[in-house]
Amino acid sequence: MKLRIYEKEDAAIVCSWIKDEKSLYQWSADRIGKFPVSGDELNAYYASGLNGKFIPLSALDENGCLAGHFFIRYPDESDDSTVRLGFVIIAPDLRGRGNGRKMMRLAEDYARNELHASKITLGVFAENESARYCYEAAGFRQTGGISNYKINDGEWECLEMEKEID
């Protein structure tokens, strides 16, 4: 697996991996559209004024096919030492086989070597056990921070996680 900069053509494939409304909200919280989300909506969201400290990336498998996607942003524009991951997703047929952990290692390498960051943070919904397990397997630990999102008719608990990198 290797990383490359996200291309607009990736959007339709990434969005096709989101099979239902719950998956959409687990992936993007309340940040983008309604189910079914389209590639055009994802590209519009990315082009909608997100600042220059926003880097969407795509993971490719050994055959050069799209295998995963995420973005990196700076939660505090005045602090380049901490980056945050968002919209993390792996192709459905590649899940459950360590590919998410591989992509997290690539994200860590990118953050360390290209961005010179020393910490990565992310949020994961408490009920998204497979994602939380993936992040824990990649070395992320809960910080104790919890926020709540109103999603549909309920409230979802989002756990803050981080990993120190050197």
Image (tube, rainbow, N blue to C red):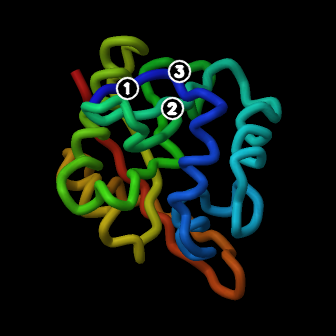
Label number found at residue 3: 1
Q: Amino acid at mark 2?
A: Ile
Q: Position of residue 94 (x, y in %)?
A: 29, 55
Q: Residue at x 29, y 49 (%)?
A: 100
Q: Secondary structure beneath disc 2?
A: strand
Asked whether, in this view, residue 12 is left or right of residue 98, the answer is right
State if disc 3 and disc 2 touch (CB < 8 Å): no
Residue 115: which quarter of the image?
top left
Q: Residue at x 30, y 40 (%)?
A: 104
Sort mark 3 into few (<14), some (14-19) or many (20+) by Cα contacts within 10 Å: few
In the rendered image, which residue does mark 3 sit on? 79
Q: Position of residue 18 (x, y in %)?
A: 55, 63
Label number found at residue 161: none
Q: Secondary structure beneath disc 1?
A: strand
Q: Amino acid at mark 3?
A: Asp
Label number found at residue 72: 2
Q: CA distance from mark 1 to mark 3?
A: 24 Å
Q: Residue at x 19, y 51 (%)?
A: 98
128 to 105, vertically: above or below: below
